[in-house]
Image (cartoon, rainbow, N blue to C red):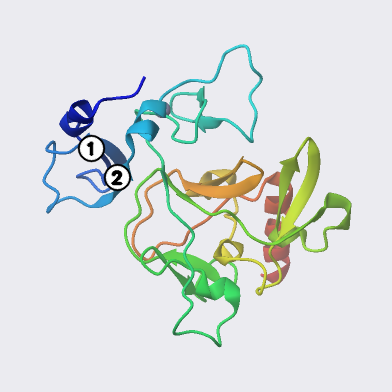
Amino acid sequence: MVATRSQTRGRKSHYYVVAANLEAIEILEEGEFDMNNREVLGEISDAAYERLGVKKDGRLKFDTNKHIVCLDCQAHYKEKEGCKLHPIYWVENSFASQGGRRLPYAERTIPPEYFYLSEDTIAGQGIKAARKIPVGLVFGPYKGIKTPTEECRNPGYSWHVTIKGKLFTVDAFDKTKGNWLRYVNSPNEETGGNMIPFQYQEKIYYKTIKVIQKDEEVLVWYGEQYGKELRNLRASRQ
Ligand SMILES: [Zn+2]
């Protein structure tokens, strides 16, 4: 059904807005909030608004490339907009082409409004928050060299990605090919992460699952295997 001009004009816009407590994202209608006092992340199109909260067909198997999980609701959603009660906001990858030609590509992709590179982390270089970051922001995709898993040379900088049922790895060890997500360290324990990785449409993204305070390190759990290796490595250094 196509809306008439007058119907379209009468419709109010919706926006992704950082909640008043700065800890989550809300979707609010124009006029429901004071735009001058609240941080607006972006407008949500009418079409995308309609897709919010539409669950995947229960008869279909969950497909990591097509569906979005809401961990709070334990539900699978059909479209990338995901859950209506716990909205996610996809932050576009940025690239600072000016002001840092001497820096490697990976460093120039750090979105400065959110993050900065730090040497003072749990494991060498890492990423810290430049501001308080609410739950539900999605960053990425993770960029790197895609190879068949058996040929992956840098497992510490790689994620598995399933493409047409086959397992590949995206290796971001090379700073001229990988983007800033390569700098994010893993916590010692699974519960120590404030972001989680997930696959969507054959790419890996990171999503905030805990509020990240300004100057706090961003941490993504790399999985049990990697966690163990990291623990052993650290124990051997002490
Ligand atoms: Zn939810």
At x 40% / y 69%, what residue is drawn? Answer: 112
Rendered image: mark on residue 43: 2
Q: Please, which residue is most extreme toward the right here?
A: 150
Residue 8 in the figure: left or right of residue 218: left
- Estimate how packed mark 1 is, as few (under 14), some (14 to 19) or many (20 or more) residues with alpha carbons within 10 Å: some
Q: Position of residue 191 (x, y in %)?
A: 53, 44
Query: Does 162 appear above or below 54?
Result: below
At x 66% / y 74%, what residue is drawn? Answer: 176
Q: Is residue 125 visible?
A: no
Q: Nearer the viewer, residue 229 or 100?
A: 100
Query: Does 78 appear above or below 113?
Result: above
Query: Does 33 appear above or below 39?
Result: above
Of the residues shown, which amino acid type is indicated by label 2? Glu
Of the residues shown, which amino acid type is indicated by label 1? Ser
Disc 1, SS: loop
Task: State yes or no: discs 1 and 2 in contact (Cβ < 8 Å).
Answer: yes
Q: Please, which residue is most extreme toward the bottom here?
A: 102
Q: Distance between the Cα atoms at labels 1 and 2?
A: 7 Å
- Which residue is tagged 1? 13
Rendered image: mark on residue 125: none
Q: Position of residue 17 (x, y in %)?
A: 26, 44
Q: Position of residue 62 (x, y in %)?
A: 63, 24
At x 64% / y 36%, what residue is drawn? Answer: 65
